[in-house]
Amino acid sequence: MQLKNVKVSRDDNAWEIEVLAEIPEEILQHYREELLKEIQKDAKLDGFRQGKAPPERILEVYGETAVTKQAIERAIQHELPELLASEKALIIEAPRVSIDPREEGKPVSFTARAALAPKVELADYKSIAAALNVKKDEIIVSDEEHKQAMTHLRRERARIDKIETGLAPQKAAEEAREMKEEELPPLDDKFVQSLGMENAEKFSETVRANIKTEKEMQAGEKNRAALLEKLVSSSQISYPKMLRDYELDDMESRLKHDVEQAGMTWTGYISETKKTREELRESWKEAADKRTKVRLILTEIARKENIKHDETRFEEELMRAKKQIPNADPAALQAHIAHTLQNEATINWLLQQ
């Protein structure tokens, strides 16, 4: 079998394939006869044993229009995949088909569109990661940073002391802010021991270590962001609109959750922003595009380098998520956690290059 007058084009912007084709009369009749035989096999019509009703009677009961419509759909279902395979078109969704009105005795024209599988041309990710990693600055905590942190803690102790003497919390906070540094209470052994620390010296060392840990975390996030930004800008990514829409749906869902957690309704939030839902989603498109590309890049790197997530941690995260979201779809939850952990493992692998 073969379709006629086939025209295949690719929409690079939407990253979709489009097929315009005709089903010749002889092909349509083949599938029509095939369909009638299947209907005949199971049909139970008055006056005939099962499987013995003639085609003419079947057409009277089912109707020529309905049979022809099913025959057209069957022809497309069988012929279109072969055509797409011959075009080496890897699609990630069932084709969306529109069929032109049929004229008796003439070929049936139809149009089919389908999203193509993403195309990911990675940059030299190892070199990019290595170049960024060697630029990492040594993390140090200056004496001034340490002093500011200790002063803040002394001011906080002053606020708590004032509250314990009966002062209103707001008034206590105002007075503590206005106190000069030399007026602030010390973080002496007695006080820090009340917090469970050994002595003031150990407390001071812990504060310095905590500042360093925080700075390391901030530097790590900065390096991670720089790495992903460079990978996105250096790689060539083509993907269908449906993947960006998935990211937009996820962004909207997360925002709805945050809004509801804050005690607002989604309708009320939309009203306050003075934007429509469509305008909000439009404003997120650039971020959604970047998120989509990051997902595709990390997935491809993980595939090439055979990077897997840690199974023990996966089970732990899955159990925790099931408790937090008991009504979540199990398959979707597992896929989300596995994908998140694999991305994390891939980023960590890159940061070690």
Image: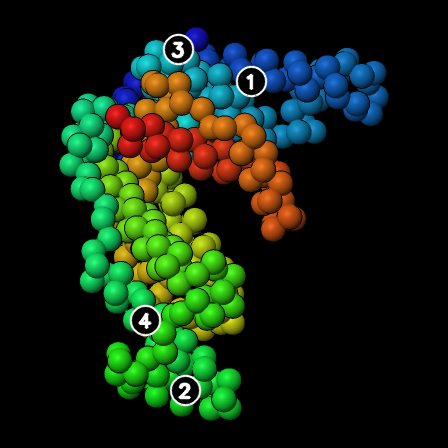
- N-terminal of the pair, mark 2 or mark 1, is 1
Q: Position of residue 260 (x, y in %)?
A: 51, 66
Q: Position of residue 252 (x, y in %)?
A: 42, 55
| Quadrant, the N terminus | top left
Task: State which mark lies toward you, 4 or 1.
Answer: 4
Residue type pointed to by label 4: His
Quadrant location of residue 179? bottom left
Residue closer to the observer: 103 or 119: 119
Residue type pointed to by label 1: Arg
Residue type pointed to by label 2: Ala
Secondary element type, mark 1? helix
- N-terminal of the pair, mark 1 or mark 3, is 3
- N-terminal of the pair, mark 4 or mark 1, is 1
- All told, the count of numbered labels is 4
Task: Residue under label 1, please give it.
Answer: 32
Residue closer to the observer: 54 or 240: 240
Residue at horizontal 71 percent and vertical 17 percent from the top:
40
Cα separation, mark 2 vs mark 3, equals 85 Å
Q: Residues within 10 Å of mark 1 (few under 14, many from 20)?
A: many
Task: Residue under label 4, please give it.
Answer: 152
- N-terminal of the pair, mark 2 or mark 3, is 3
Residue closer to the observer: 343 or 195: 195
Q: Using the image, tell me which numbered label, if any, was put on residue 172.
A: 2
- N-terminal of the pair, mark 4 or mark 2, is 4
Cα separation, mark 4 vs mark 1, equals 83 Å
Residue at horizontal 39 percent and vertical 80 percent from the top:
158
Q: Is residue 296 visible?
A: no
Q: Residues within 10 Å of mark 3 (few under 14, many from 20)?
A: some
CB atoms at circles 2 and 3 under 8 Å apart? Answer: no
